[in-house]
Image (tube, helix red, strand yellow):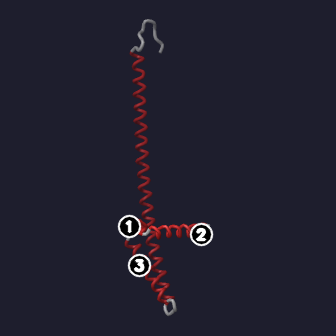
Amino acid sequence: MNRQPGEPYGSAPEREAPSQGGDGAREGMERARDAASGAREQAEQGAMQARERASQAAEQGEERAAEGMEQAASMIRDRADGTPAAGAAMKAADGMERSADYLRKHDTNEMWQDVEHYVREHPVAGIAGSVAAGFLVGRLLK
């Protein structure tokens, strides 16, 4: 900006300065894009690892639930034998064994798809089930 007497406006040094600043800004933008891209890749990798861990935990939980249902069904059968409610107890034990078998044969994604399909086909039952589950969770958390 310090112009010497007789020097025309917009001399070469003044014209180069903005372009040099523009190059620096471009480099800064490129570095920022590279940093953002690297951060995005790290976040995606972290999310993928978290999904894998959650899936493994869900599968382990399914197996434990299936084992628990089978043990409960066995206990019901043992204790209900010869009682007046033996028929109802046997039906309950059969249902628990079918549920355990379902848990073992289907992965988490298939179960969610089945739940979504059921709720679409039976919206009132889906809402009632959600309300009941919310009530139970609320009672457990008190």
Q: Quadrant of residue 139?
A: bottom right
- At label 2, the amino acid type is Arg
- At label 3, the amino acid type is Arg
Seen as rendered, the residue at the extreme right is 142
Q: For this rendering, which residue is in front, 52 or 72?
A: 72
Q: For this rendering, which residue is in front, 61 or 94?
A: 94
Residue annotated with mark 1: 110
Residue annotated with mark 3: 98
Query: Which class describes the residues within 10 Å of circle 2: few (<14), some (14-19), or many (20+)?
Result: few
What x and y, as percent, mark residue 112?
41, 65
Q: Is residue 51 above or below residue 87?
A: above
Q: Tell me the CA gap for discs 2 and 1.
A: 29 Å
| Pointer 3 with pointer 2, Cβ within 8 A | no
Residue annotated with mark 2: 139
- At label 1, the amino acid type is Glu
| Mark positioned earlier in the residue sequence (1 or 3) | 3
Q: Quadrant of residue 58?
A: bottom left
What x and y, as percent, mark residue 1?
47, 15
Instruction: Name the residue at 41% across, 55% down.
Output: 48
| Mark positioned earlier in the residue sequence (2 or 1) | 1
What x and y, as percent, mark residue 96?
45, 79
Name the element at disc 2.
helix
Name the element at disc 1.
helix
Q: Quadrant of the C terminus?
A: bottom right
